[in-house]
Amino acid sequence: MKFTGVLILCFGLFFYGFSQGSCNVNFVKESRWEQILKKAKEENKNIFIDCVASWCGPCKRMDKFVYTDCKISDYVNERYIAIKLQFDSTTNDDESVRAMYSLAEEINRKYIIAAYPTFLFFSPKGELLHKDIGGREPNGFKSLLSEASDSSKQFYTLLKRYDNRKLDPREMMQLSKMATRLHLSKKSKIIAYDYIDNWLMKQPDSIILHPSNIAFMGDYINSSNKKAYSFFRKKHNTINTAMRDSGYVRSVYNRIINEEYILPELYITPFLGSDKRVFKSSTPDWELMYKKIRKQYDTSYTNWNILFAKIDWYREQALWENLGKVYVEYFNRYGVNTSSLILSMGVNTVCWDVIFKHVNDVGVLNKSTEWMAQVLKAQPDVPEFIDTYANLLYKVGKQQQALVMQEKAVSIAQNKESYIENLNKMKSGIPTWKNSK
């Protein structure tokens, strides 16, 4: 059975507190940028813009628990002209919010607000000094305010120094990481490659092999033409030892293989971190892809990457029978890893979402019952796992064994409805699966 749940992905931390009396940040209701600049100049204050959306939970929590903190509100009110801009629109927006729509559009055009909350810090002249993303608890926001007032930590101040070739090379790593956090991936890569190729690779091994530098290179190497790639090839074992991970270099190579050989064959344009992947319509030439990879890497790398490419391709094309056979090849080659609950859940997901729901090949179905038997040996009392195993047994015609397992799932499950439904179908000889192609 498939696990169900809610995965909440949002910026910020969950935090609790109480408002500090009548303290609050004084957000100015001014819709014209020129007037905001005029006010900032007259009062000799910087400008702070809190970029929010009506649906943003962390934004609401900050209104309730952060901007009402007296130390924060006093600090912001003393040093900033504070503006709150809502970047979506709803029918419930009052006139003050509606009046700010055009300014929000202007700010979005210039500075590309891609997540909420986003914080922008400007000089009195309107020069963007610093930017950050994500909800904060009071102490975290105090730290952000401190960074925003420190020219040695302001992102855009550092970026200006970098562009003018005045930034210490040792500060480039952090600047690249900041750019990544702000979704400026192109700029982040430019800075990273500059740091790696033109400074780091010229240092002695004692510096290059520091774990922080290795990790940074590992995150950004995406081509076998990079200087760092050659270093990784020469220092393979030394790097793994430094990272205390015998598979670290392998993981870097796998990503490079994916970038250079797999993605260009599967997608119309190489996948560069966007969620919008467009698959090619023609079936990849797996044999040719294998030969290309094999010229540069041994069979262990080649087999691994080709298998995962096939999994991506067949799943996208809904070629379930092919996908089922690839999973058989995968588990035959690498085994069924049930060493943790999370890994067992992964096996369960393959068996339920792919094989039970979509595959009719008896050989594949029988293999999947073997995999789930191994899962249950490691995790014997998880009702979802038992239910998957029972349904697979039932699909391959082992009705009595299936009934025993399904009754066990019913007996230990808290929410029994779907388990009982499947049990009744099994007793009546009715398929518990839908026929699919």
Image (cartoon, rainbow, N blue to C red):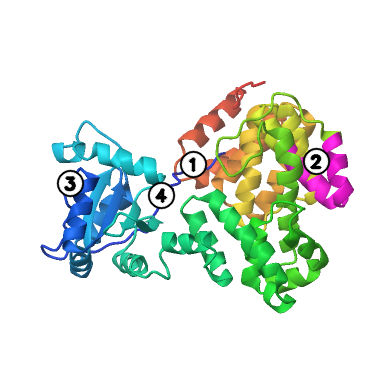
Q: In the rendered image, which residue does mark 3 sit on?
A: 30
User: Separation of disc 4 and disc 1 at Cα?
Assistant: 19 Å
Q: Is residue 301 left or right of residue 345?
A: right
Numbered marks: total: 4
Q: Which numbered tag is attached to residue 329? A: 2
Where 257 sits versus 269, above or below? below
Mark 1 or 2, nearer chain start = 1
Q: Is residue 276 left or right of residue 377?
A: left
User: Residue 353: in sight, yes or no?
Assistant: yes
Mark 4 or 1, nearer chain start = 1
Residue type of the residue flagged with mark 3: Glu
Tell us which disc is closer to us: 4 or 1. Answer: 4
Q: Residue furthest bottom?
A: 206
User: Residue 336: in sight, yes or no?
Assistant: no
Q: In the rendered image, which residue does mark 4 sit on?
A: 10
Quarter placement of the C terminus: top right
- Mark 2: secondary structure: helix
Q: Residues within 10 Å of mark 4 (few under 14, many from 20)?
A: some
Tell me if residue 59 is in the magenta stretch: no
Q: Main secondary structure of the magenta part?
A: helix
Q: Quadrant of residue 379?
A: bottom right
Residues drawn in magenta: 288-310
Tell us which disc is closer to us: 3 or 2. Answer: 3
**Contact check, label 3 and label 2, Cβ < 8 Å:** no
- Mark 4: secondary structure: loop
Q: Residue at x 73, y 62 (%)?
A: 228
- Mark 3: secondary structure: loop
Q: Which numbered tag is attached to residue 4? A: 1
Q: Residues within 10 Å of mark 2 (few under 14, many from 20)?
A: few
Residue type of the residue flagged with mark 4: Cys
Measured from the top left, where is residue 241 in percent x and y? Answer: 74, 73
